[in-house]
Amino acid sequence: MTWQEQLKAFVRTTEQLETFIHLTAEERLALENQQTKWGTTPYFASLMERDNPNCPIRRQVVPSLQEQHNQFGRENYLLWKENRETDEVRPDSIARQYRDRVAFTVTQGCGIYCRHCFRKELVIDGDLQLDFNVDEGLAWLAEHAEVRDVLVTGGDPFLLADEQLDYLIRKLRELPHVEMIRFGSRTPIVLPQRIDAGLKKILGGYHRTPLWLNTQCNHPNELTDASARAVLELLSCGVNVGNQAVLLKGINDDVTTFRALHQKLLQQRIRPYYLFYCEAAPGIDHFRTPVERGAELIRDALRGHTTGLAQPLYVVATNIGKIPLMPDYYQLGSDADGHRLRNHRGQTTCLPRIPA
Ligand SMILES: *Cc1c(COP(=O)(O)O)cnc(C)c1O
Ligand code: SF4
């Protein structure tokens, strides 16, 4: 199937879903009783285990009754997070937390509607009405010469048609101050068919302004021959590919899965970039671990246990930017002689203390 055929056959009804999995009574209830947008490409649906309600892919796709509970989430989360109520006048499409870079939202469509999405108020629930006018965003960018890095996001920007993407990239490359363009897209994982000859023509070739892409892969089962091929195609036309995983309870929060995920990402040429703590959006409490868990996993599953390239930076994205939450277990404290350090086996060593 082409990517357009995948979208035409998009799984959005209970009947379609049942061709892939046997639904539990609870899943059926959640599907029948909730006014929530959900759905997946048939490709990603085909990766679900038919008889396992705890399948890590299924849990990202199928709505749960637990989404109605909210203890830790913040109402109007996105308005708070994206500083949309602050003084600077910006189009809806531009979210800003830093001086030199912005997030530019160009669509609300996605290849799957992730149950843990922190943008769910916008992307899934549709509670937030915003206007994503690309030309308005481009005009704002043209007037902000301090912005050197534009992160094109959504939704999923790779769901735009080739002509729209071509226009967007050409216009961004015409801005002399934009030194790099980044895309956040789950398509290499949930719709790898999207990385086709037409897209490669738009992305490829030598350009002064490089393209980077960060995808989202949360479990090793999401990595297939098709995703590996899509990543190679992206790399072959000069697009660097990274991953932004979300720490999800019961999906990737154990040592074995967590290590396998990061090793397999590298096997498919994807460089782990961020591990995100599940943000404080409403209705996703059931995916949230204690905040320490991510640092423990990096300490117990990755650092020292496997390739240094496999290490993501563990962060939480907040209204004041992304804040690192990395383990500091290595510095055991310091005395007059220096700093004591510990490795992944528990051995210690010493680093001299240099006065300022
Ligand atoms: C995540 C984000 C960025 C990019 O942050 P990096 O740490 O550079 O990847 C930029 N702007 C906004 C508003 C963001 O949320
Ligand atoms: S692809 Fe991204 S924006 Fe879309 S539902 Fe998933 S997490 Fe949200």
Image (cartoon, grey):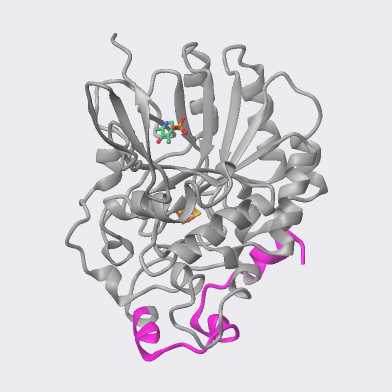
Quadrant of the image for the C terminus? Answer: top left
Q: Residue at x 59, y 64 (%)?
A: 222
Q: Is residue 323 visible?
A: no
Coordinates of residue 92 in the picture (x, y in percent): 39, 34
- Most foreground residue, 146 or 128: 146
Query: Looking at the image, in which quadrant does ligand 1 appear?
Result: top left
Left-right relation of 182 to 304: right
Q: Residue furthest front?
A: 337
Q: Nearer the viewer, residue 324 or 259?
A: 259
Question: Which residue is drawn at the image coordinates 35% and 27% (left, top)?
Answer: 97
Q: Tell me if residue 278 is in the magenta stretch.
A: no
In this rendering, the answer to whether 105 lies above or below 171 is below
Number of disc labels: 0
Q: In the figure, 245 relative to 352: above or below? A: below
User: Is 119 or 35 nearer to us in this picture?
Assistant: 119
Image quadrant for the N terminus? Answer: bottom right
- Locate residue 346, reporting x and y percent: 37, 49
What residue is at 30 percent from the left and 76 percent from the top? 65
Q: Residue furthest top?
A: 356
The magenta region covers 1-30
Q: Between 147 and 259, which is closer to the camera in this rendering?
A: 259
Residue that appears at 22% across and 21% down = 336
| Residue 21, magenta (yes or no) | yes
User: Is any atom of residue 227 visible in this view?
Assistant: yes
* Image spot of residue 127 (x, y percent): 31, 54
Measuring from the top left, give residue 279's x and y in whole percent.
31, 50
Image vertical order of residue 167 relative to residue 264, above or below: above
Location of residue 87 with respect to 27 vertically, above or below:
above
